[in-house]
Amino acid sequence: MAAALRRHLTAKARAGIRVIPKDRPRESNPVAPALSESSLLITGDPAVYESKTLDELRAAIGDCRRCKLWSGRTHLVFGVGNPSARVMFVGEGPGRDEDLQGVPFVGRAGQLLTDIITKGMGLKREDVYIANVVKCRPPENRNPEPDEVESCEPFLKKQVDLVRPKIIVALGKFAVQCLLQSKQPITRLRGQWHEYQGIKLMPTFHPAYLLRNPGDKKLVWEDIKKVIEALKSA
Ligand code: URA
């Protein structure tokens, strides 16, 4: 019973679902394996963490209004690509083009990402999986706010769980710091292997940054070469 409950709680935690004892304040939020099912209050959406496929997850997210970003969106940008991809790219959040089309990385920065995937890695866009930390466009492309990330990151966690890529490439300061729960500068984090949900993660610069700073493309190429090398033995 204790082992089953531990597995149950771990699955929820991986999906970003908070499970707290009914009689304890939210701040103390131990995932305590000794608790019985009846003493638990589950916060979050069971349909999200119980999803078995990306399509089920997308359906569970539905016409999301879990944070304030819903009011400004044209489309919720869920993610695209191979559901069994070996490489997953994670950006910050949709921009204008992505919001209009409902597809991640389709604007100018997206074209550069596509070049990295196709010309740099010799893959097709359809071979990889591409998603963002938040699924709805922040107004004026501002950084997502903490409550927006808190509402949305469980979906990304579940996407990672379902795709189970060999490698995640985190694009740009925001996504990198958010996934790694780090305040260190991207210049320090990039180019080194890290881990997210037990999966190797390579931080690199965001393609939009590269459009403004093309001189740093060589650094991204160094990072991508490490990814290509690691994929050979993954
Ligand atoms: N920038 C991102 O971080 N994600 C997109 O989908 C597009 C631009």
Image (tube, rainbow, N blue to C red):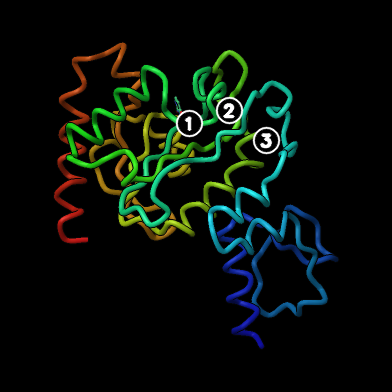
Q: Are marks 2 and 3 in contact (CB under 8 Å)?
A: no
- Give the residue drawn at x 70%, y 29%: 70
Q: Quadrant of residue 128?
A: top left
SS at circle 3: helix
**Direction from residue 40 to residue 51 in the image, left or right:** left
Q: How many marks?
A: 3
Residue 194: x and y in percent read 32, 49
Q: Quadrant of residue 36?
A: bottom right
Pick the residue in front: 88 or 204: 88
Q: Are marks 3 and 1 in contact (CB under 8 Å)?
A: no
Looking at numbered disc 1 in the image, what kind of residue is underneath it? Glu
Count neighbours of disc 1 (C-alpha within 10 A) and say few if under 14, some if 14 to 19, many if 20 or more: many
The residue at which mark 2 appears reads as 144
The residue at which mark 1 appears reads as 92
Up the image or down, 226 lies above or below 3; here it is: above
Q: Are marks 2 and 1 in contact (CB under 8 Å)?
A: yes
Residue 63: x and y in percent read 72, 39
First in residue order: circle 3 vs circle 1: 1
Image quarter (top left, top right, bottom left or bottom right) of the C terminus = bottom left
Q: Is mark 1 within 8 Å of ligand 1?
A: yes
Ligand 1: quadrant of the figure: top left
* The furthest residue to the bottom: 1
Looking at numbered disc 3 in the image, what kind of residue is underneath it? Asp
First in residue order: circle 2 vs circle 1: 1
Pick the residue in front: 107 or 180: 107
The residue at which mark 3 appears reads as 147
